[in-house]
Every structure is written in C-alpha cells, then in structure tokens.
Image (spheres, coloured by chain):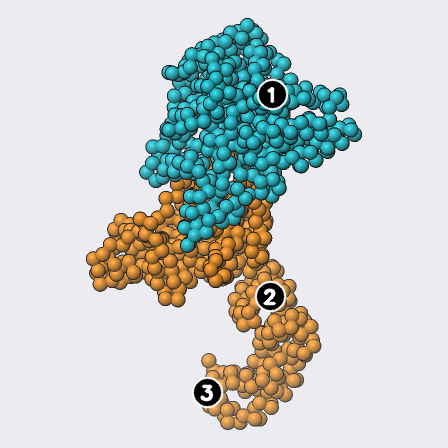
C-alpha cells in the first residue's frame, strides 16, 4: 500500500468507497411481470405498473429477492430476515411514478466482505456495508428528435442490487480489483451478468484524500462510471484535483461529480446545496419483506462453488500455482475447461498449454473460451498425442494452430498432414549425415570445443526432418555421430 | 321499482316480476332527470348499462344469474374502468381512459352488476363536501328548512347522492378518512369501510395508500352486505390485500346483538357536539341494550390525536402518490419551455386548490429536518391508536359512536378555513388509521329534517359483527324518511 499522490506538501493517501449497481438476472422486473430483455425495441418491455399508471401497484418478484439473498450469501454477508422498501421521491421524465422504490433504512443484506488480490500477490479484505434492492428508472434520449426528448421505459422497474462497500480501498488498483472480484462472484452466482458496457453493472465512486494517520476528509462522489478502467482513471484524476485544492489552501466541498474520459477529468454535476431532498418514507403499497429462515438456508445449500474456494481446491487437487489457479477461476467456464482437460492428465502441463499457446491462439483470433473452436476434449486429445509419442511438442504447437483454424480434431490433423514424429533411427541417421556433410566448418568449430553448436546441429536435423523428428532420438544419435558436448 | 332495496330487486328479478332491462331503464331515466340538478355523475354510461342489463336478463334466462345480476349501481370515478373515462374528479385526468379495470369494479361486473356511470367525488378523494371536484359540486338530495343547497358530504358525495336520490340502487365508494361514512350519514344511507386489506386497491386511483379502502354504499345495511360480498377478496396484484376467505356478510345481518358487548368511547364526546347527535347516540345505546347487548364504557385515549395524525400521514402519502401526474405519459399536459416548466404548468393547471394544499403539506412533513417531527411521530401515535382499539376490543365486540359531528351543511358554509372542514372527519379517521372496519347507519333526523348516522366500529376482519350491530340499529331506528329530491317524487 505504498500508493500515494505526491503533492508539494508531501504524500497524500487515497480513501475510496464504491457503490456498485448490479442489474439482477431475472426474467421479469422487480415489481411487475414485464420482461427485462436487453436491446429490445423502445417501450416494448413495459407494464402499466412500470409506466406509473393510476391505480397500479407494485408486487415484489420472488426471484429477484432470491437473487439478492444469493448475492448476500456469496459476499459472506448478513441476510436480514426482515427488510423494508421505501420511496425515494424526485421528479424526472424517465421516472414514471415520481419516486423510486428502494430500500433505505432496512436493506435486505447487511455487512459482508470481499477478499481482493493485488499484482504484488498481496491480498486485502474489503468490507461490504450493505446490499439493497431497488428499481431502475427508464432512459431519456435527447438526441433522437430536434426539439423533443424521447423516453424509453424498458429499463423502468428492472431490479438492481446496490452493493455498497466500506471506504476500505486506498489505491485505484484496489478499486479495480474489487470490481473485478465482485463481478466474478456475481457471475458465479448467476445473479448479474456484469456487463458494464451494456450498463448492467455501473459504479458510483466515493473519493477523498488525507495525510497519513488523519481522519477522513470531505469526499466527492463520481456518478455512473461504466468501466473498470474509467473507475481507476476517475479515482486518480479526482484525487489529484482534491490534493491541488487542499494544497492551494482551499477546501474540498462535498458534491456529486461526473468523469469525462475524453479529458481525463471529473467535473461538478451538483453541489450539496442542490442535492435533492428525496423525502424517503416507507413504501405503503408493500408490506415489510419477511424471509423464511429455512428458505434462506436452502438457497445457501444451492450456492455454486465460489471463486476463492475453487482456487484453493484447484491448487490442492491439481498441484497448480496460486497464480495459475487465480487466472482459471476468474471465469467459471475457464475453470471448468481446465478441470475437464486436467482430469487424468498432467495438470501442470495442461496449465502451461492453456496459459501459453491456447490462450494466445484465442486472443489472436478474437475468441473467448465460451466460443472456443477447440473443445476441452480436443485439447486433451492433443496432449495425449504428445504423451504417447505420436507427435513432439513442436509439432503439437502447429497442430493446435490448425485446430484453432479449422476446428478439426488433433488426431485427424496429424494423420491427414503426416505430422507423426519420426522414430525411425535410419531416417534420423540419414538426416544427420546430410547436415554434417553440408556444414564441415561448423563441425570443425564444434570439435574444437564450441559446445554451443550442438544446438545448431539439433536444429538443422529437425529442420531437415520438417520438425517431425523425435527430439530425444535426434539428440542421442547426434551424440553418437559428433560426440556429446563437454558441458 | 326505484324504491326497492337490492335484496328486494334480486328477489323480483329471480321471480321474473321485473327484468334487468326494466330496472336499468328506470334508473337511467332517473339519472337523466336528476343529474342535471344533483351532478352526482361525471360520466353516464347508459348504452353500456343497457347492454349489461340485456346480458343479465339473457344469463338469468338460462339459469346463470350471479349474485348481483341486473342490479344498477354507480361507480365512484376513482375506480379505473376499462374503456370508460376515469377522472378522479380532477382536470389532470380529464382525457384519461384506462386500458384496464380495477379489481373491485371487475368483480362487480363479473357478479352481474350494471354500471350506470362514474360518480362525482372530491378531487382525488380529498374533501368532505364534494366541493373540490373539478366537475362541479354535487348537491345533496335532502333539503334543509331554509332551502339552502346542501353538500352531500365527501369524498364519495356523488355515490351518496345517487343512491339517496334513487338514481342507483347502490354505489362503490372509497374511504380514506371517512369518505364513505360521512356522506352516507349526510344523505341518509348506509355505507361501510371494510377492514384495510378486505378489498383490493388495484386499479383505484391512490390518495393515501395505507388508509384507502373501497366499500359499498346502499340504502340498507343488508344491501351493503350483498355488495361487499361481491367486492371483497384476496388479489395478488395488491400486496396489502388480505389472503383470507370472504364470510357471508348478508347472513351476518340477521344475527342480532344478543350477548354482544358494545363499547361507548368516552373520548368521542367532543365539545360543541350538536345536542341532537348526543341524543341520537343515546338512542342507539338504548336500542342495542333493548336488543340484548351489554353496554360498556371504553376509552380510546389517543382519539384526540386522530385528526392531526391523519392530516400528516394522508398528505404525505398523497404528495408521493400524485407525483405521477406530470403530463408526461397520460392525462392532461401543458407544454413548457423545459421539463421543469412542463411539470409546473401541467400541475398548476391540472390540480385544484385543495389537492395543491395537501401536496404541499405532505411534501413539507416528509422534508429533511421535519420528517422525524411530523411523519415519524405521526406513525408512532398511529401505532398507539391501533393499540387503543386492540385494548378496547379485548373487552367489547363492537364500538358505537356518531358518524359525523353535524348534519349536512350548505354549500359555502365551513369553507373559509380548511381546518373547520377537516373537523368533519373527527369520528371517522381513527378507524382508517387503525385499519378496522366501520359502518354508518341512518338513524334519525335532526330538527331541520336532515339525516344523521350512527357509526359501528368492529375488530379487524370482523365485518360480520359490524353488520349484525348495524342491522339491529337499522331495525330499531325504523328510518323511513326520504330526501325531497328523488326519482319518482313530485318535486
């Protein structure tokens, strides 16, 4: 935690807290039966409840509640068996009821924690203050018509979880790691898809700066940041702005700000004086939300294995490193892929292949593990071909390229292209003789003690055999012909 | 035919002595004759009513006549009715035709009731006199000796006037602080606010969500029981509706009060109460005693806080409930330079003075810095009032009080000061705040010939006892007086 901003008066420490809004995965909205499909035609996913028509009443969606409870359990948080909905009142054209139904004083989930891991390998525990359920507003579009604003209410009423952290983070990196980890957990739980570019996850960032050992100074909130990179940039830009203010004798005022990624700076959205008075009060259309303890216990037993547990198990069961394991568990499908390939095989070798050539090939072709042209079974079959001596490691890399390109099985590729490795010592000897004959000067140098040239001869022989020579046999035969290197 | 009760009409229909079409036509004629004067209906749906009546006759001919088949009623214009304009008495909803039906009106329709039209009311049900309607005041069909035009009470004033004047056999009302019982008392009819949660609020334009409750208004206690039976029941679209069976309310009317303990709350003897009301209350006590009930003095010590609590809680909820009338998606809009200007112009033009007053009160009491002193404290006192009732109901089965502190007053009276008007609700708001059922029964006339009602309050979900006590009072009172302005009368 050596990250500080160096001002003219010395180093400044950052204090960061995050409020993440995560859209709940659910077929229908928090208080109505309308669908929640992203990207639908405007105003096609709207019930009269979502549009705030007279006499319409909210009815809580049980599945959204279950999703919030699952998330709470996944964050090792306290599940509040009694919670309550409140109205947050303000006027806006895309807020049909004139209030948002949220949870103010009594959220469904209380204190929890997330453990994050940093580049340095250091881990930190970040406190979760609370998680509450609330409904999303619609969307105002100001650029579709010359003189009018258009409103799309498809999002209106969609369930969101607001997950509030303690002000426990001290660096932009920690904030990034926190969001990544939170996103991974939500995806494992199946409670939020975590797609920040579709807006199904967005963050409000609270930032303040202080000298070491001080109490908290005034913070500013940066609203609606929609990528991890921007979160990190916004924190740094905002912290620098605050340091400058303090150091020039000014005072940071509490306010809501926006991050402008193009300029790399934050700007004021509204000051504390302009802050809305939301006039919260208990939502009279809904009874308090009372959860059955046994139901919560059932949800708990149905939780999937979560990233931290999975990482520990992969290290334990497969003997791979913490680093390798951490990469595999970032996405559930990756971990599943690894486990499928590694079962019954040399897990260390599987890890090397996946993290090396396989991921590189996916990256190069713009694919991800979900739509990989190479199945786990085929990657396993490729490694089996190495193990049983059908092909050597170098040829295997070529075969993998062809698998990625064509989607064909490795066995078929090896057969069709004659890539089987050559173990015929006669053929190897012939190739060696040919190489020796072509390089008398190099041979002389080698004989006179330039041992490093042994590798040159191996390479030439392999090249003469189009890469298919069995490397061990080639080495052995070369040693016979030209003598083993001294070292 | 117009003087029949719903029970009598159902018997006559079943015996084929009359047809639903005849009954409906007679009422449509009455509406057409009297509405220009009384203004009880905002919208008249004569064609639809005739079609429903024909359907009722056809259904009965094949032996399929549900509980209210062919009974013509008025629907308070706060219930959303599919395809029929629903205004809530406000200009802001003048062009609003709901694409959906409220649960209560849908249930009445399914029970075969014939809707004559949408009854006038105070704007957004805010008022005790029906003078705040954007569609004009309703006149009470009863006349005072000085000939002054009287208010029918409110907010269900159109419903009350329609039933009293024989324009409809029954009507729906809603009651947030007395809006069924006070107009029932002012017009000499019966009306019950059932337990909060008995009738679904789905599709009823909301005033104050934690207090609003639909209920029936009719000329007899039994008719109210018949109507309530059709209106009640669990609705999964209203989270506050109660998932419990609907009892046979009509049968309860015949139970009598033998052995029942009736509480008389001393706190309801307020200063300045008209002596006639005091006398009527004593008559009610005597009638019940004679019918076999035991009379017990009880105390509801927090009664005096009822009005202040009500006038904090109800406007607070209303200020939020009425935020949706912004001119953006439905209803009337007045365009503006920008969004805020549009809101301000739309709401300035669309809402009347009383609605604006309550929105401002409600906004104030929920504001940062005032919430604890007003709203939170009011909720605490409300809890104490509920406790008062629960403690009283530990020793008594029902409570008897007057319905309102006075008889109907003239249009123009009590209008200088809103607080004077708010005093009308002094006896009725406590049962809304506690959520208990309460009914007004016509029990007598004052010296100037105007009807007065007695109120029976019961335990949560014990409307049956309320009906039993009310029906006993009704029989003992023998209230047969009729309003001067009524269908079939010569005047």
Chain given the colour orange: A
**Mark 2, chain letter?**
A
The residue identified by callout 3 is A450
State whether residue B172 is above or below residue B325. above
Q: Nearer the viewer, mark 2 or mark 3?
A: 2
Looking at the figure, which quarter contains the N terminus of chain B?
Answer: top right
Determine the residue located farthest toward the right in the rendered image: B62
Mark 3 neighbour density, 10 Å: few (under 14) some (14–19) many (20 or more): some
Mark 2 neighbour density, 10 Å: few (under 14) some (14–19) many (20 or more): some
Q: Is residue B355 visible?
A: yes
**Towards the viewer: B340 or A487:** B340
Find numbered disc 2 in the image and state the secondary structure of the residue it sits on: loop
**Distance between mark 1 and mark 2 Cα atoms:** 90 Å
**Mark 3, chain letter?**
A
The residue identified by callout 2 is A372
**Towards the viewer: B315 or A198:** B315
Q: Please tell me which residue is depicted at 43% across the width and 52% down the height of the picture.
A: B336
**Towards the viewer: A401 or B371:** B371
**Towards the viewer: B127 or B63:** B127
Q: Position of residue A59 (x, y in %)?
A: 55, 39
Q: Please tell me which residue is depicted at 28% across the width and 52% down the height of the picture.
A: A253
Q: Name the mark on residue B490.
A: 1
State whether residue A218 is above or below residue B134. below
Find numbered disc 1 in the image and state the secondary structure of the residue it sits on: loop
Tell me what hue chain B is rendered in: cyan
Mark 1 neighbour density, 10 Å: few (under 14) some (14–19) many (20 or more): few
**Distance between mark 2 and mark 3 Cα atoms:** 46 Å
Q: Position of residue A249 (x, y in %)?
A: 20, 57
Q: Nearer the viewer, mark 1 or mark 2?
A: 1
Q: Does the residue at mark 1 contact the one at mark 2 (Cβ under 8 Å)?
A: no
Q: Position of residue A99 (x, y in %)?
A: 45, 44
């Amino acid at each position: 935690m050596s990250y500080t901003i160096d001002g003219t008066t010395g180093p400044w420490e950052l204090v960061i807290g995050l409020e993440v809004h995560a859209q709940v995965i659910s077929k229908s909205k928090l208080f109505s039966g309308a669908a929640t499909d992203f990207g639908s035609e405007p105003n096609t996913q709207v019930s009269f409840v979502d549009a705030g028509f007279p006499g319409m009443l909210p009815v809580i969606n049980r599945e959204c509640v279950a999703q919030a409870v699952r998330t709470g359990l996944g964050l090792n948080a306290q599940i509040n068996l009694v919670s309550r909905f409140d109205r947050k009142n303000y006027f806006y054209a895309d807020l049909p009821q004139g209030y948002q139904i949220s949870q103010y004083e009594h959220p469904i989930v209380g204190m929890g924690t997330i453990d994050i891991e940093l580049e340095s390998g250091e881990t930190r525990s970040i406190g979760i203050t609370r998680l509450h359920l609330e409904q999303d507003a619609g969307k105002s579009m100001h650029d579709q018509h010359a003189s009018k604003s258009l409103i799309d209410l498809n999002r209106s009423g969609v369930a969101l979880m607001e997950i509030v952290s303690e002000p426990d983070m001290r660096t932009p990196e920690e904030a990034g790691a926190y969001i990544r980890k939170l996103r991974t957990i939500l995806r494992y739980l199946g409670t939020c898809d975590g797609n920040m570019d579709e807006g199904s996850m967005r963050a409000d960032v609270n930032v303040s700066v202080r000298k070491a050992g001080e109490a908290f100074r005034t913070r500013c909130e940066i609203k609606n940041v929609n990528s991890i990179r921007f979160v990190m940039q916004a924190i740094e830009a905002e912290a620098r702005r605050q340091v400058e203010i303090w150091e020039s004798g000014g005072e940071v005022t509490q306010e809501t700000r926006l991050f402008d990624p193009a300029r790399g700076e934050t700007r004021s959205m509204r000051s504390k004086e302009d802050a809305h008075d939301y006039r919260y009060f208990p939502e009279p259309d809904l009874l308090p939300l009372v959860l059955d303890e046994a139901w919560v216990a059932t949800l708990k037993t149905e939780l999937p294995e979560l990233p931290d547990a999975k990482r520990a198990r992969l290290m334990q069961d497969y003997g791979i490193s913490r680093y390798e394991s951490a990469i595999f568990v970032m996405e559930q499908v990756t971990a599943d892929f690894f486990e499928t390939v590694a079962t019954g095989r040399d897990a260390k070798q599987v890890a090397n292949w996946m993290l090396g050539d396989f991921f590189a090939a996916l990256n190069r072709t713009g694919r991800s593990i979900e739509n990989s042209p190479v199945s786990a079974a085929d990657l396993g079959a490729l490694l089996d071909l190495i193990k049983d001596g059908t092909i050597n490691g170098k040829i295997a890399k070529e075969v993998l390229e062809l698998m990625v390109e064509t989607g064909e099985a490795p066995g078929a590729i090896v057969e069709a292209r004659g890539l089987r490795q050559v173990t015929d010592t006669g053929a190897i000897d012939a190739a060696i003789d040919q190489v020796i004959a072509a390089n008398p000067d190099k041979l002389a140098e080698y004989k006179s003690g330039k041992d490093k040239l042994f590798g040159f001869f191996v390479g030439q022989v392999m090249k003469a055999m189009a890469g298919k020579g069995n490397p061990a046999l080639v080495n052995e035969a070369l040693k016979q012909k030209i003598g083993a290197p001294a070292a | 035919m117009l003087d029949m009760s719903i029970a009598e009409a159902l018997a006559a229909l079943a015996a084929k002595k009359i047809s639903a079409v005849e009954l409906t036509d007679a009422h449509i004629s009455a509406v057409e004759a009297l509405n220009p004067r009384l203004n009880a209906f905002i919208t008249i749906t004569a064609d639809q009513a005739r079609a429903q009546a024909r359907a009722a006759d056809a259904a009965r001919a094949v032996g399929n006549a549900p509980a209210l088949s062919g009974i013509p009623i008025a629907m308070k214009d706060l219930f959303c009715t599919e395809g029929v304009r629903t205004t809530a008495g406000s200009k802001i909803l003048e062009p609003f035709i709901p694409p959906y039906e409220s649960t209560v009106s849908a249930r009445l329709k399914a029970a075969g009731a014939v809707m004559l039209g949408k009854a006038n009311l105070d704007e957004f049900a805010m008022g005790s006199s029906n003078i705040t309607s954007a569609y004009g005041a309703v006149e009470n069909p009863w006349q005072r000796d000085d000939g002054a035009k009287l208010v029918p009470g409110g907010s269900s004033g159109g419903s009350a006037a329609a039933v009293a004047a024989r324009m409809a056999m029954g009507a729906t009302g809603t009651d947030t602080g007395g809006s069924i019982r006070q107009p029932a008392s002012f017009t000499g009819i019966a009306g019950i606010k059932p337990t909060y949660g008995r009738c679904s609020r789905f599709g009823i334009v909301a005033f104050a969500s934690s207090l609003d409750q639909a209920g029936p208004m009719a000329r007899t206690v039994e008719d109210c029981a018949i109507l309530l039976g059709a209106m009640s029941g669990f609705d999964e679209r209203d989270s506050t509706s109660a998932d419990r069976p609907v009892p046979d309310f009509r049968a309860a009317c015949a139970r009598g009060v033998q052995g029942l303990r009736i509480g008389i709350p001393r706190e309801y003897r307020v200063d300045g109460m008209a002596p006639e009301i005091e006398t009527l209350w004593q008559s009610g006590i005597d009638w019940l005693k004679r019918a076999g009930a035991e009379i017990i003095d009880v105390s509801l010590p927090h009664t005096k806080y009822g009005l202040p609590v009500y006038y904090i809680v109800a406007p607070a909820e209303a200020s939020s409930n009425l935020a949706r009338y912004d001119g953006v998606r439905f209803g009337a809009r007045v365009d503006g330079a920008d969004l805020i200007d549009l809101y301000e112009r739309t709401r300035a033009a669309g809402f009347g003075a009383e609605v604006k007053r309550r929105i401002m009160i409600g906004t104030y009491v929920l504001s940062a810095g005032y919430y604890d002193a007003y709203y939170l404290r009011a909720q605490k006192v409300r809890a104490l009032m509920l406790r008062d009732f629960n403690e009283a109901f530990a020793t008594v089965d029902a409570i008897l009080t007057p319905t309102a502190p006075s008889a109907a007053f003239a249009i123009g009276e009590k209008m200088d000061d809103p607080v004077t008007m708010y005093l009308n609700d002094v006896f009725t708001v406590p049962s809304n705040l506690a959520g208990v059922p309460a009914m007004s029964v016509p029990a007598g006339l004052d010296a100037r010939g105007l009807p007065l009602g007695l109120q029976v309050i019961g335990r949560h979900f014990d409307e049956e006892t309320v009906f039993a006590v009310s029906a006993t009072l009704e029989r003992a009172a023998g209230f047969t007086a009729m309003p001067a302005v009524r269908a079939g009368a010569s005047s």
